[in-house]
Amino acid sequence: MNTLQMAVADGMTIARRNALKIKRAPDLLGGVIALPIVFVLLFAYVFGSMIELPGISYGEYLIPGIFVQTIVMSGQITGYTLTQDLQKGIFDRFRTLPMSPSAVLTGQTVSDVIMNVTSIVVMALVGLVVGWRINSSPAEAALGFAMLLLFAYAYSWVTAAVALALRKPEVFNNAATILSMPLVFLSNAFVDSARLPGPLQPIAEWNPVSTIVQAARELFGNIPPGAAEPAAWPLRHAVPVSLLWSAVLLVVFVPLATRLYRRAVSR
């Protein structure tokens, strides 16, 4: 077995381990299944009663934003799991095994993709209940789901790098919350960014979360009929820019997280 085959096999072994860990941990499993349901129902029925969009229900407008919100919040599980394993000395045990050094991070991020598939399926089913519909072609819808999973995978490498830099679960949780809350709520996930106050509007328009949400709405056919074309360049070219964002995150944070992991296990 060559080096690449060994790395892939070891990564899949770690991914299976982490998937079983999520299955057996009620708190993590709740984050995967229960929280998406709460978010969909809460925002659809609380905000939906106050926000009117011509030609489209708020539930239909909302679900792509909830998809991205859950992806961002689920990314915290990546970092939390890594910091826990680091504190428990599990990385030291892995070092004694004949396995690829990259397997731990690869396995963790792949297991997070499986977790996000579960979350998106649950949200899509609940979204159908609150009025969400896919109004585009099957190919566009498939690209929409693939784009969301690609961004989820890329973002998990971001949280992995942050976790390995901070090393402590409590510190990481605080930092991840500070990072994720502005990303999600200072975006177009729940309301049109054009409705935000002047100083906040350009920040929201250039927020990568806004671009991903806009691209998902376009690919699922959830743009209100007659809606004005967004003024910001990333939102006017949401699909290619979303793919570019994912590529940039992978190019930057895969080597960074790998370097931080090697530094962490060498101590």
Image: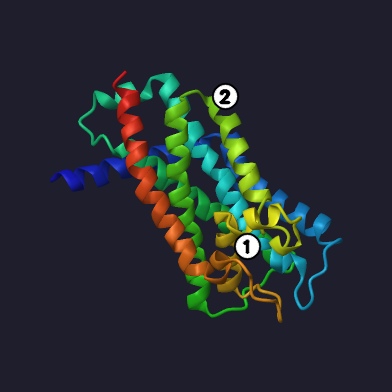
Q: Which residue is mark 1?
A: 64
Q: Position of residue 189 (x, y in %)?
A: 67, 58
Which residue is the extreme one toward the left?
Answer: 2
Give the residue drawn at x 61%, y 69%. Answer: 217
**Viewer can see residue 202:** yes
Q: Which amino acid lies under the numbered mark 2 shown in the image of this protein? A: Glu
Give the residue drawn at x 40%, y 47%. Answer: 110
Which residue is the extreme one toward the front?
Answer: 199
Q: Which amino acid lies under the numbered mark 1 shown in the image of this protein? A: Pro
Q: Residues within 10 Å of mark 1 (few under 14, many from 20)?
A: many
Give the residue drawn at x 60%, y 30%. Answer: 174
**Image disc number at residue 170:** 2
> The N terminus appears in which quarter of the rendering?
top left
- Horizontal arrangement in the rendering, residue 242 relative to residue 53 (left or right): left
| Vertical position of residue 208 compared to residue 101: above or below | below
- Horizontal arrangement in the rendering, residue 211 relative to residue 11 (left or right): right
Q: Nearer the viewer, residue 101 or 35?
A: 101
Q: Position of residue 41 (x, y in %)?
A: 75, 55
Q: Nearer the viewer, residue 194 or 176?
A: 194
